[in-house]
Image: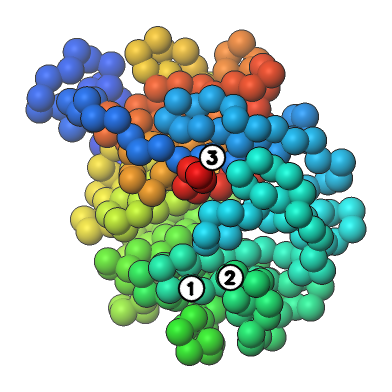
Amino acid sequence: MRFNFYKMAILIAILSICLFQSCDKDCPVCPKDDTSEPDNYRLYVINEWYNTLISIDTPADTVIDSVALNYESFGLYLTPDGNRLLVGNGDTKQMEIYNAADLSHIESINQYGDYYFDKTDNIGIYYSVMNEAIFFIDPNTLSPLDSISRSIYGGFLDTVTNLFIAPKLESRNIVYLIDCNTRMLTDSIDLGYLSWDLVYSWQTDEIYFHSRPGAASAFLVYDLELDSITLAISTVSPLGGVTISPDGSNVFMTDGGDGLHSYYPRGDIWVLDTETHELADLIPPYIFPSGEKISFPTFGEIIIAPDNRRMYIGANATTAGYIPVAVVDLQKRRIIDGMLINENLWAKDMVIGPVLE
């Protein structure tokens, strides 16, 4: 398949010129005029640099609580009620449960693995590497209700259609489609390429994922109705992270760069329109309006606040050598801050939830 490299390169060049020219109302990537305040949430972060679990008040972005972890952590998850945090203990192969309000430790449970929750439909999924099975669980008690024996490599739970999509562990070109309403495996499809991080758009019934066909690196779109790849965008190196907006209208992906040339790629955040498949925006890796560079060759996990106003991206580095979380204003489509705690905040895992009374 020929990738639309030259077409995308021209579009990127045009957008890049626009980014650094004086703004006017016709510029597609200029900051939007919106003076309203984003909603208040709690961002929970595991800071790998200091091995701590941190609670952060947003959008003020101030630390509320912090607790030391005396083990190697693996994964961070929030229960649908917003009251409990689950942290994987890589030493004991248990899940440590914390009170989200004050980060006090509640208990340890023998269900080590990845968790996915849907608050609206009361759905919980837990994948056990050791048992090689996908468990449907009660999101309140965390007790298993049913299971499917499959080995997977990550996954994505769409909270609109209740579709769980997960790459097969042994061959990640194969992805499983699981209906969480019936708790059944409904289909397995061959994407044609190995998949890394993937997301699903319920609006267009498409899977968005990153792969490396041949020696190249690309971001691809697979249409489930047409059963084929409908878009392939060349990238220089593996993407740092991929996520989709709460309304399903935009896919955000961070260009990891090749680790060799600071000028190309710059570590931009790509914004893809799911309806048109057009590049809707490029968010440059500079804090607006100071111009301080905030890219290290890869970006980390991407978290979007439920009100679609703020985006947080982990594992970055500034030109001064500090490691912050990039704070993106999604109205302005700009990085507006680099959140630092104790001079370094290597955000290994992040989740966002409500402010608890």
> Disc 1 on helix, strand or loop?
loop
Disc 3 vs disc 2: Cβ atoms closer than 8 Å?
no
Q: Nearer the viewer, residue 274 or 309?
A: 309
Quarter location, residue 169: bottom right
Q: Where is residue 345 drawn, in percent x and y? A: 65, 27
Q: How far is the residue under mark 1 from the one under mark 2?
A: 6 Å
- N-terminal of the pair, mark 3 or mark 2, is 3
Q: Where is residue 100 drawn, in percent x and y? A: 62, 47
- So how many labels did they put on this image? 3
- At x 43%, y 73%, the residue is 121
Q: Nearer the viewer, residue 133 or 259?
A: 133
Disc 1 vs disc 3: Cβ atoms closer than 8 Å?
no
Q: How far is the residue under mark 1 from the one under mark 3?
A: 22 Å
- At x 31%, y 79%, the residue is 225
Q: Nearer the viewer, residue 354 or 125?
A: 354
Give the residue pinned by disc 2.
Answer: 139
Q: Mark number for residue 163?
A: none
Q: Mark number for residue 43?
A: 3
Quarter location, residue 197: bottom right
Q: Amino acid at mark 3?
A: Leu
Q: In the picture shown, does residue 134 fall above or below 154? A: below
Q: Amino acid at mark 1?
A: Asn
The N terminus sits in image quarter: bottom left
Disc 1 vs disc 2: Cβ atoms closer than 8 Å?
yes
Give the residue pinned by disc 1.
Answer: 122
Q: In the picture shown, does residue 169 fall above or below 79? A: below
Q: Where is residue 46 drawn, in percent x and y? A: 68, 40
